[in-house]
Image: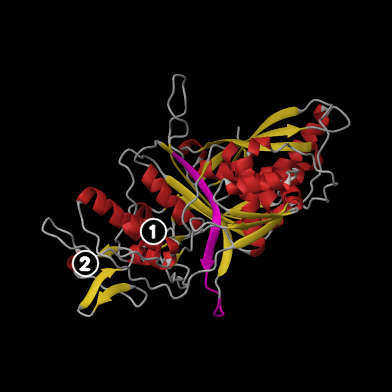
Amino acid sequence: MERKLDETTVLVCDEAGALSIAGIMGGSETEVSGDTKNVLLEGASWNMINIRKTARAQNLPSEASYRYSRGVHPSMAERGVRRGLELMHTWGGGEVVAGLVDNYPLPPRTPVVEISAADVKRWLGIELPAKQIADLLTRLDFKVELSGEIIRATCPDTRLDIGEGVTGKADLIEEVARVYGYDNIPEIRLADVLPPQKGNPVLEKEERVRDLLVAFGLQEVISYRWSTPEKEARRIAPGAEADGKPYIKMLNPLSYDKAFLRHSVMSSVLDVAEHNSRIRERLSYFEIGPIFLQGEEAGLPDELRRLGIVMAGQRQPAGWQPADTSNMDFFDLKGVIEGLLNGLRLRGVRFEPAEAPSFHPGKCARVLVGEQQIGVFGELHPRVREQFDWSATLKGAVVAGEFDMDLLLQLVPPMYQTENLPTFPPVLEDLALVLDEAVPADKVEAFIRQTGGKLLSDVRLFDVFRSELIGAGKKSLAYSLTYQAPDRTLKDDEIKQLRNKIIKRLEHEVSAKLRS
């Protein structure tokens, strides 16, 4: 078998050529068979990092590489050879030929570390006599010299993990704690006053987003930050334009499918949902993570935080009690977004029809807070859905969205005002309107709220009706209105006057008629 070696690979050779890949595997020239009569033993110490990298690059794990990649002290090479000769002579009947060739030009310096009982007390919080500390280290094969309160420890060759200087002191005190017993170290209350703690508002707001989404029944996923342009192109309908920015390729990718930094978190969540559609009837996932876009100037890419959401399948899993097992649609995701933004105490939220290459025409919306767009969501375009390998059991729409987390968290108010619980009873009233199909429901709701003022505490759309009875190109929207005053019980005349004012405003603004 031929192998391609790079310049970092170490070979053991003689005058005729290579005999083995050092510390990993011997060649055919060094094999031992049933006819072998003479054996030459080689003991060596190799650079453990080089052995580890070479074994991985050659995909050649072995007993030798397992040991050498973890480190073998040079002094162990001679001991290993002598032990091998002893076993072959004792149990194999071999004759040992006198002579040992040893090439040991640069012996490593054996770490010598000094600690004191005061160091142990300062690091561990316990008082141990210097003699007891020395005894503990002696039990671990350290050569210990005790001079008053100073313990000078020489490390055994087998302990390659012990450093020098400050690092070595920390390593040695850790060994003392380990042998003394962690359970024997008492808990000690801090004597000093804790300094003022600084919060992390951005992290706290992000955790609030997670808590709200989980409360709405979504599961958080964490996916790789890497993808490929081909995989991410599946989220865009064929023929539609992508973001136009180049993908950033990794210098040392784990594999080709993880060779590029991603442009979309929603694409990653779609991959998770696609995989899980084989084992789940309800898919409801979100992820908060970075995307990487190359800016105008050369250099490091812009790392932007995004929120991706994907929902599909049954609204509720079937159980022993009646449940709504119908499939989720556009309005389920819209409800989650409304609940999220309301839970973050954002004001001035509105939804507008939009077009995006990932979503179905007419079933896509953008979310605005004031005049700033924080995201787009909708039902996946049929041609986008075809590019994913969904389970045949997944019925209904797949709805998804991607949102700008950086902007969203900036808009979350640091403080908000609470309202006192009402002490006077509310008055509930339904209002059914007939208007053109093209008029958005949220526009109607905005006019109702503006006209109702402070006495209108809540507006809720509860029915949408279409029929030839109300005319072609028309629809009926039914709203539940809640009137309430903070300082008195409203009278019928006040409510009637306010209702008439709302109806006149809607007649003027959107040509709405009161449905009889």
The quarter in which the N terminus is drawn is bottom left
Please say whether residue 439 is visible from this viewpoint: yes
Please say whether residue 435 is visible from this viewpoint: no
Callout 2 amino acid: Gly
Residue at the spot of label 1:
79
Tell me how the rendering is colored: secondary structure
Q: Position of residue 383 (x, y in %)?
A: 35, 56
- The secondary structure that dominates the magenta segment is strand
Callout 1 amino acid: Arg
* Residue 290 included in the magenta stretch of the image: yes
Q: Position of residue 430 (x, y in %)?
A: 66, 31
Instruction: Using the rendered view, name the quadrant where residue 240 is placed.
Output: bottom left
Q: Is residue 54 left or right of residue 409?
A: left
* Residue 463 included in the magenta stretch of the image: no
Q: Earlier in the sequence, mark 1 or mark 2?
A: 2
What secondary structure is marked by label 1? helix
Residue at the spot of label 2:
27
Q: Is residue 28 left or right of residue 348?
A: left
Which segment did they paint magenta?
283-299
Q: Residues within 10 Å of mark 2 (few under 14, many from 20)?
A: few
What secondary structure is marked by label 2? loop
Residue 37 vs residue 55, the one in the foreground: 37
**Cα distance in 3D space between marks 1 and 2:** 24 Å
Labelled pair 1, 2 in contact (Cβ < 8 Å): no
